[in-house]
């Protein structure tokens, strides 16, 4: 239990550093100082800032969607996209360090993908459909801001709901 709390303190410190400085300007020294631990303590668990930030992203984004009411998967997915889009860490990374997201878009699934897929597979009951829903939701999360004017985010979210209703209905 102590190590979990200890890791939470480190992850909190890393999140705070990223929010303050961005990923590129955050160092393990900054995180260690803010968390009140030695750099060696951090290096035992994370070889670099990016791996630490990956764990922060997973924790923050899974927490953001954990309590969604999956009895209505369409509403849950749309609300999950809204929550993530408005999450301070998401906004900071998209604004200051968007290249950090590229591996998760082009090369591999991350832990957040895996967690969301597990829930969607249970709710939807079909692995292919769960993946398609995640891909659609991800595109609305990432690219919706590029499609504004003359439409709003609320209007695009309504279209996401329409797409998902037709697909899952």
Image: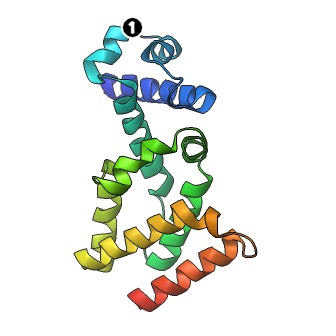
Q: Where is residue 80 drawn, in percent x and y?
A: 51, 63
Q: Residue at x 52, y 60 (%)?
A: 142
Q: Is residue 69 visible?
A: no
- 2 and 163: which is toward the camera: 163
- Placement of the N terminus among the 4 image quadrants: top left
In the rendered image of this protein, does residue 131 appear above or below residue 35?
Answer: below
Q: Residue at x 30, y 16 (%)?
A: 43
Asked where in the image residue 20 lies, by quadrant, the reply is: top right
Label 1 Cα neighbours within 10 Å, binned few <14 / some 14-19 / many ≥20: few
The residue that disc 1 covers is: 38
- 115 and 160: which is toward the camera: 160
Most distant residue in the left direction: 127
In the rendered image of this protein, does residue 76 appear above or below residue 158?
Answer: above
Q: Is residue 63 left or right of residue 126?
A: right
Q: Is residue 135 left or right of residue 20?
A: left
In the rendered image of this protein, does residue 83 appear above or below residue 20?
Answer: below
Q: Where is residue 156 drawn, in percent x and y?
A: 63, 75
Q: Residue at x 34, y 70 (%)?
A: 120
* Kind of element beneath mark 1: loop
Q: How is the image coloured?
A: rainbow
Q: Residue at x 48, y 17 (%)?
A: 35
Q: Is residue 132 left or right of residue 145?
A: left
Q: Where is residue 68 drawn, in percent x and y?
A: 48, 64
The tally of labels here is 1
- Placement of the C terminus among the 4 image quadrants: bottom left
- 13 and 139: which is toward the camera: 139
Q: Is residue 18 visible?
A: yes
Q: Where is residue 16 drawn, in percent x and y?
A: 57, 28
- 126 and 3: which is toward the camera: 126
In the rendered image of this protein, does residue 139 appear above or below residue 19?
Answer: below
């Amino acid at each position: 239990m102590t190590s979990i709390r200890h890791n939470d303190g480190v992850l909190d410190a890393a999140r705070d550093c990223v929010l303050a400085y961005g990923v590129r300007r955050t160092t393990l020294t900054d995180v260690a100082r803010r968390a009140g631990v030695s750099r060696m303590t951090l290096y035992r668990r994370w070889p670099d800032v990016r791996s630490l930030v990956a764990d922060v992203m997973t924790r923050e984004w899974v927490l953001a969607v954990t309590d969604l009411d999956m009895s209505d998967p369409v509403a849950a997915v749309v609300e999950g996209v809204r929550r993530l889009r408005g999450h301070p860490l998401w906004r900071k990374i998209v604004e200051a360090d968007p290249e950090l997201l590229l591996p998760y878009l082009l090369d591999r699934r991350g832990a957040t993908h895996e967690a969301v897929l597990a829930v969607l597979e249970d709710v939807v009951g079909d692995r292919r459909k769960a993946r398609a829903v995640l891909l659609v939701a991800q595109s609305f999360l990432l690219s919706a801001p590029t499609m504004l004017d003359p439409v709003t985010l609320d209007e695009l979210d309504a279209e996401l709901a329409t797409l998902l209703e037709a697909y899952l209905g």
